[in-house]
Image (cartoon, rainbow, N blue to C red):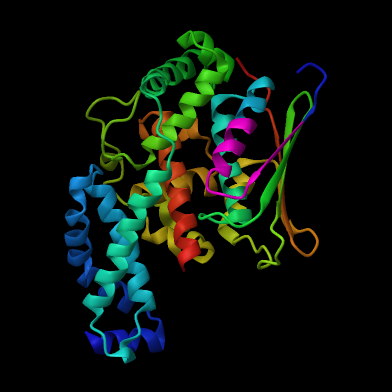
């Protein structure tokens, strides 16, 4: 996909979602030359962020994922459209700590009445060898 | 025993909680073994039922006139059934991908040593002579191994090099236990080895590769332990 820097994916907010999100994110990270270490961190982060939207059992509604990449950075934004107002997202202290270690920046927030959104950015390290 | 539950409900004393959990671990193990003919490692089932026991202890209402053992049996059996049901949803990996996953375990270890850093996916693909997509698919297939026994050697591990042997002594770095406990008491319910790896990755900031080196296990095993621990913490957080 030369020249392309944005990939969008919408999927039901079911338990299958994290797998789709992981595969897409790791495929794009691969294009950026992420290391195995970084890809594994990215996969863990995606799982944690999907959990913040749909829990472990899924929710009614659809999740829109947007992956944006430049030369060395991958950003992922996920928005749950549920049609109902769920609880406000309150990422636990542990969840924040985990994400801080896995990605460069992240955020989970309510976005309007019936939307929850996560966002994360991970930058590739320069290869040493 | 009922008095202890009353005391726990009134004080929330962690010592009483621990005592009650320990007193019923036999029940948790017994129930786990009843499910062991379904092809899951007993250790994993014991872990599922132990987490369910914790939940049962926390939620039991001694004023309701039901015996704790009855309540706990219901809770634990429900959790074990759910464990199997959830696992049934997992995408079954094709055999070829399972084999590639095992090969990748060796390649990651070898390349990390040669390069002095974690290899890229492209380098792994070249080393194993498959496409980058197949490497990623195999890593995804590796998720299915998350529930496999963690005592078994993982791809790339030295034979006989048990993780548990690295954790025989109290690790001085575990002095940060209080910080972890403050962030999530759920971590304490994990086996010590998983606690240690979580600590090294998220509280000391070591990379997966560095953890693998420090503990003398494969990086793939570290990945697997981390993914599994986080999944367990998420499930426990949702239930608490």
Image height of B117 relative to B212, above or below:
above
Q: Quadrant of the N terminus of chain A?
A: top right
Residue under the point 27% across and 85% down: B4
In the image, is residue A55 part of the stretch drawn in magenta? no
Q: Quadrant of residue B33?
A: bottom left
In the image, is residue A11 part of the stretch drawn in magenta? yes
Q: Is residue B141 left or right of residue B205?
A: left
Please say whether residue B30 is visible from this viewpoint.
yes
Q: Where in the figure is residue B42, as x and y percent of width and height?
A: 22, 48
How many discs appear? Answer: 0
Residues rendered magenta in the picture: A7-25
Image height of B140 relative to B33, above or below:
above
Q: Where in the figure is residue B24, as x and y percent of width and height?
A: 21, 70
Q: Quadrant of the C terminus of chain A?
A: top right
Please say whether residue B178 is visible from this viewpoint.
no
Residue under the point 45% across and 43% down: B226
Q: Where in the figure is residue B216, as x and y percent of width and height?
A: 35, 30
Q: Where in the figure is residue B26, as x and y percent of width and height?
A: 17, 65
Q: Is residue B30 left or right of residue A125?
A: left
Furthest-right residue in this view = A3
Image height of B185 relative to B47, above or below:
below
Residue under the point 36% across and 31% down: B217
């Amino acid at each position: 996909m030369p020249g392309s820097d944005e990939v969008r994916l919408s999927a039901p907010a079911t338990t299958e979602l994290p797998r789709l999100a992981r595969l897409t994110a790791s495929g794009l990270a691969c294009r950026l030359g992420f290391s195995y270490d970084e890809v594994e961190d990215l996969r863990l982060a995606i799982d944690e962020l999907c959990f913040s939207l749909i829990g472990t059992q899924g929710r009614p509604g659809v999740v829109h994922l947007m992956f944006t990449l430049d030369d060395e950075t991958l950003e992922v934004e996920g928005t749950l459209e549920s049609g109902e107002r769920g609880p406000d997202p309150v990422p636990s202290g542990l969840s924040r700590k985990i994400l801080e270690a896995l990605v460069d920046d992240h955020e989970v927030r309510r976005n309007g009445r019936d939307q929850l959104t996560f966002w994360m950015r991970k930058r590739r390290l320069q290869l040493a060898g | 025993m009922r008095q202890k539950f009353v005391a726990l409900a009134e004080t929330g004393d962690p010592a009483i909680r621990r005592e009650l959990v320990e007193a019923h671990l036999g029940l948790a193990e017994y129930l786990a073994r009843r499910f062991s003919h379904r092809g899951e490692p007993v250790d994993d089932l014991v872990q599922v039922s132990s987490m369910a026991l914790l939940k049962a202890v926390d939620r039991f209402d001694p004023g309701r006139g039901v015996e704790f053992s009855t309540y706990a049996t219901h809770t634990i059996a429900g959790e074990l059934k759910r464990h199997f049901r959830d696992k049934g949803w997992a995408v079954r990996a094709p055999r070829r991908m399972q084999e590639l996953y095992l090969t990748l375990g060796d390649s990651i270890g070898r390349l990390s040593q040669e390069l002095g850093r974690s290899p890229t996916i492209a380098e792994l693909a070249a080393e194993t002579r498959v496409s980058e997509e197949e490497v990623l698919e195999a890593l995804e297939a590796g998720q299915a191994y998350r529930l496999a026994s963690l005592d078994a050697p993982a791809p790339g591990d030295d034979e006989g090099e048990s993780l548990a042997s690295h954790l025989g002594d109290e690790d001085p770095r575990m002095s940060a236990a209080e910080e972890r406990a403050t962030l999530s008491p759920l971590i304490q319910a994990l086996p010590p080895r998983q606690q240690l790896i979580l600590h090294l990755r998220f509280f000391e900031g070591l990379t997966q590769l560095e953890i693998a080196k420090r503990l003398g296990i494969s990086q793939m095993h570290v990945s697997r332990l981390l993914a599994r621990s986080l999944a367990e913490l998420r499930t426990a957080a949702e239930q608490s």
